[in-house]
Amino acid sequence: AQSVTQPDIHITVSEGASLELRCNYSYGATPYLFWYVQSPGQGLQLLLKYFSGDTLVQGIKGFEAEFKRSQSSFNLRKPSVHWSDAAEYFCAVGATGNQFYFGTGTSLTVIP
Amino acid sequence: DTAVSQTPKYLVTQMGNDKSIKCEQNLGHDTMYWYKQDSKKFLKIMFSYNNKELIINETVPNRFSPKSPDKAHLNLHINSLELGDSAVYFCASSEGNSPEQYFGPGTRLTVT
C-alpha cells in the first residue's frame, strides 16, 4: 500500500540556518511527489513537485527537493531559512486512480 | 480568478445541526475531492468525484454526503453534526488521471 512518512513531527531552526525536512514514501511504481506548505490558519500552497526527469527540483520561496529512488526519499531543503517560513510542511504522493496520500506533516519553528 | 474556492471559510454550529460546504473550481477539471484535516493536522481523502460520478468513497460516516451538480462544483453536506466533525475541510480538483491536485483555501468547521 502507498504511504508517506515524515519522521520529524517538529523541527526548530534559527533564522538564516539551513533546513532539511525528510520525506520517505512507499509506492510500487514511479511516484509523483509533492511538497506543500500550510501557514497558520491558511490553506495548502504547493512548493514544488516531481514527476520525472531531473531529480533535483526547484520550487517557490527558495525551496528545493531531491528525489532519491534508492532511498525512497524526497527531502525538502532550503539553504537559509526566514522567519516567514515557519509553518506546517506536508509531503505527498500522487498515485494512479486519483489517489493522493499525505504525510503527517512537519511543523517548523524559526527562532530569531 | 481563484482556481478552487470554498464557502464558507469559517463555520461554527451546534451539535445536531445540518450544514453544507460549497466548492467550485474554474480550472475546467473533471475530478474533484474532499479532504478532512483533523486537529493533529492529518489530511485524509474523504470523497472523489469524476464528471459528477463518485469514484472514491473512503470510510466516512454516512452523515456526510457529497453532491456534484456539475463537474465544476462539489458540495459537502453533513447531517447531525457531532463534536468530532470539527476539522478543516479542503476541496481539491484535478484533470483526468493527472496526479496533481489543486487545493482550495479550506473551511474550518467548529461544532459546539
Image (cartoon, helix red, strand yellow):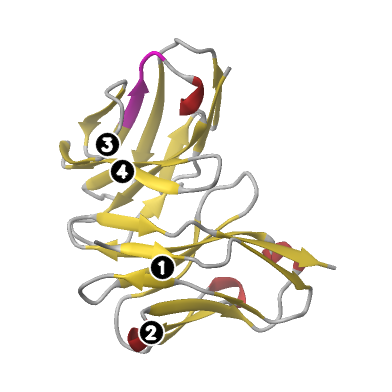
Estimate how packed mark 1 is, as few (under 14), some (14 to 19) or many (20 or more) residues with alpha carbons within 10 Å. Answer: many
Task: Specify start and end residues of the magenta stretch as a single range.
Answer: B75-80
B54 or A7, which lies in front?
A7
Give the quadrant of the C terminus of chain B. top right
Estimate how packed mark 2 is, as few (under 14), some (14 to 19) or many (20 or more) residues with alpha carbons within 10 Å. Answer: few
Estimate how packed mark 4 is, as few (under 14), some (14 to 19) or many (20 or more) residues with alpha carbons within 10 Å. Answer: many
Mark 2 to mark 3 CA distance (whole Å): 32 Å
For the stretch drawn in magenta, what is the main secondary structure?
Answer: strand
Q: Are marks 4 and 2 in contact (CB under 8 Å)?
A: no
Say which quarter of the image contains residue A99.
bottom left
Question: Amino acid type of disc 2?
Answer: Gln
- The answer to whether marks 2 and 3 sit on the same chain is no
Q: Are marks 2 and 3 in contact (CB under 8 Å)?
A: no
Label 2 chain ID? A
Residue located beneath label 1 in the image: A34
As drawn, the label of residue B59 is 3
Can residue A50 be seen by looking at this rendering?
Answer: yes
Residue located beneath label 2 in the image: A71
Label 3 chain ID? B
Q: Say if A108 sits above or below B40 in the image.
A: below
